[in-house]
Image (cartoon, rainbow, N blue to C red):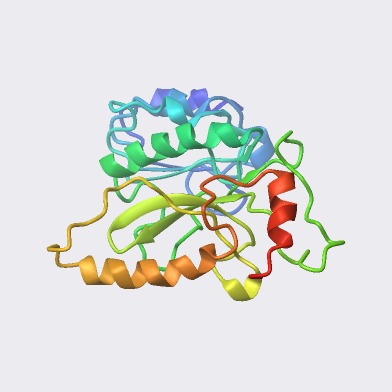
Amino acid sequence: GNIRSLRVLKDTLEKVVIMNCGSQFVFRSSSVEGNFMDLADFPLLKVLNLTESAVTGDIGQIGQNDFMAIETIELPSGVYGGTYYKFQRISDVPGVVHAIYRLMKRTPTIFRDFHLRNSQHQLLLWKLSADSSDFYRQNYQHRNGFIRPPFNVGFVRVGSRLGWCWYSGDLWSVRDGCLSCEINWLDPEPSSECSDYELYVKELQDVQKFMRFYRGFHLPPTEMEYNQLLDEPHI
């Protein structure tokens, strides 16, 4: 069916969860289609989880007056900017990041659990598509070929300051091969007079160790630049 069929419940619906196991409004994932924005004007809707549906749309279309009661939202990869979305171009990412940032400023809890300290990089789990013209393969033939290109996109919270970056690996861990490009900051640097400034400085020092390889790059390097970095003696 189409998610638009829920509009008959517009004035009373508070929670929609579309998944394959017991919950409210349960459907088989492949059977639910439509555009998630058809629910944008539901005045009482607090929880929207469509991650296992075939719903589409564009997260950047959420305006200041949409989903006014929403507390958490989770969208599938079929939505432009949804969870596990794969971008076709590196240049597309900053615009979607800023759309997400606007939503987070309006509703800090809108993306589940990202307010927690240990959730770095795990928000939305975006990647560059292997079909992208910007994509290239890891150079396994090189002696330093264990270093992967930074084709994942993650959000980073350092102290109270929020930013985002491109990174390699699946986790925020050097042990698991995670190396990060420079952080693209969304929030301004806190004042040295702020109560959490010392925490910010300490955490910034901690995350900077992940940038040692891709230092100076705010976006993924080209394939030529990547191979040149593999030749660097500092590895």
Quadrant assignment, res 64: top left
Residue 92 coordinates in the image, percent (x, y): 55, 32
Count of marks, rendered view: 0
Q: Is residue 232 left or right of residue 160?
A: right
Q: Quadrant where the C terminus lies?
A: bottom right
Residue that lies at the very extreme toward the front in this rendered image:
233
Of residue 86 and residue 42, the one placed in the foreground of this image is 86
Q: Residue at x 35, y 53 (%)?
A: 162
Residue 217 coordinates in the image, percent (x, y): 54, 50
Quadrant assignment, res 100: top left
Q: Is residue 162 left or right of residue 134?
A: left
Residue 230 seen in the figure:
yes
Q: Residue at x 78, y 64 (%)?
A: 145
Residue 14 seen in the figure:
no
Of residue 27 and residue 77, the one placed in the foreground of this image is 77
For residue 88, above or below residue 49: above
For residue 95, above or below residue 207: above
Q: Quadrant where the N terminus lies?
A: top right
Residue that lies at the very extreme toward the right in this rendered image:
141
Q: Residue at x 47, y 46 (%)?
A: 24
Q: Residue at x 56, y 45 (%)?
A: 219
Of residue 206 and residue 82, the one placed in the foreground of this image is 206
